[in-house]
Amino acid sequence: MKKLKSALAFSLCAAAAGVQAQTELTVYTALEADDLKRYAQSFNDDHPDIKINWVRDSTGIVTARLLAEKENPRADVVWGLAGTSLLMLKNEGMLAPYAPEGLENLSPKFRDRDEVPSWVGMNAWMAAVCVNTIEAENEGLPMPSSWEDLTKPVYQGHVVMPNPNSSGTGFLDVSAWLQMMGEDEGWAFMDGLHNNISRYTHSGSKPCKMAASGETPIGVSFAFRGARLKDQGAPLELVFPEEGLGWEVEAAGIIKGTSKLDAAQTLVDWAISREAMEMYNEGFAIVAMPGVAKPVKHFPENADELIIENDFAWAAENREAILSKWQKRYDTKSEAQ
């Protein structure tokens, strides 16, 4: 009887340990910190058996780190990184194809084109110009309505934008200008814009934050950050340039060779669930699952119509060449890292 009790006690302890045991995932992300906190809490509530060790930085830095670790990957999953970055990782053979639960519910624009995709999209963030109305009036600056307006001499020294080498927002801008205007006109436009830039930041949201605080009258950033700051009372006007807006897919994928495949697949399943899409829609007007998105305050109602026809494959294939050329021409105004 004593042996039976001991065996039963051991079984109960083992069962309890099993319940409490957690699979640890290392997840690389470029999600905004305030959003990441909300998403992570919701996932943890649904899956307490999975513990996530987050590694967060800006898009360019996360992408460079993943590529540098190609021969010895340290991440299990990438969640919330630009689609062009995921395409680069796919082309390097670094992603494990996986068709997550609910894949059929996504728009074709928000997934890898292969039958079994290497990455899936979550939402889209799009460009915007944040203008501090008080500072613009103090400086006698007219409200811009186009990208071309920002090259006018009146704006000299009054514009801040992200460095595309470290910021996904910066790269989506540069990529969009080259696609909309063509290579020669696109670089000519950036030459003119560079004359008016006071600095290039290493964060996509920072130019808008600087505009909100009055550090600069104009910040080239993205709509989500501008809308949130305006809602918090910042004296901002959000401008959506008439030529069209660059945009990017926030995407997720599994790193090839992970030893935590089941947990990694669980996270990617959750990342494209309706629950997750509804959370994304709190800050993003465009999400990967059609029929979910509701209007977002301070966003244009026709957001889908304003974004350009984005060739993500072209952007991914030409990313390194574009960034190298940009750095040679304009990096002298980048802030120190």
Image (cartoon, rainbow, N blue to C red):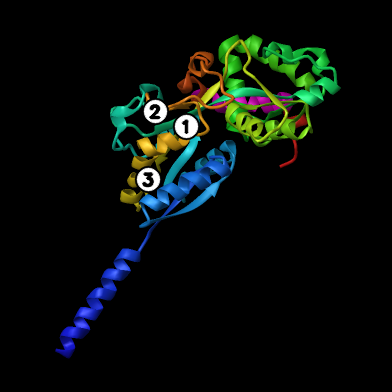
Can residue 304 be seen in this snapshot? yes
Which mark is nearer the camera, 3 or 1? 1
Task: Determine whether label 1 and label 2 are within 8 Å by CB.
Answer: yes
In the image, residue 39 above or below residue 114? below
Please tell me which residue lies in front, 238 or 104.
Answer: 238
Residue 262 image offset from top left, x and y in percent = 30, 50
Q: Is residue 164 left or right of residue 317?
A: right
Q: Residues within 10 Å of mark 1 (few under 14, many from 20)?
A: many
Q: Which residue is mark 2?
A: 292
Q: Earlier in the sequence, mark 1 or mark 2?
A: 1
* Quadrant location of the N terminus in the rendered image: bottom left
Residue 23, image quadrant: bottom left
- Secondary structure, magenta segment, majority class: helix
Q: How many marks?
A: 3
Q: Which residue is mark 1?
A: 281
Q: What's the distance in space between the residues labelled 3 and 1, CA to CA?
A: 19 Å
Q: Which mark is residue 267?
A: 3
Residues packed near mark 2 inside 10 Å, few (<14), some (14 to 19) or many (20 plus):
some
Q: Quadrant of residue 147?
A: top right
Q: Residue furthest bottom?
A: 2
Viewer-closest of 225 and 26: 225
Q: Secondary structure at mark 3?
A: helix
Pick whichever of labels 2 and 3 is earlier in the sequence: 3
Percent from the top left, x then y, of residue 69?
Answer: 50, 46
- Residue farthest along the left direction in this orientation: 1
Q: x and y percent of residue 52 in the render?
A: 45, 53
Kind of residue at badge 2: Val
Q: What's the magenta region?
A: 317-330
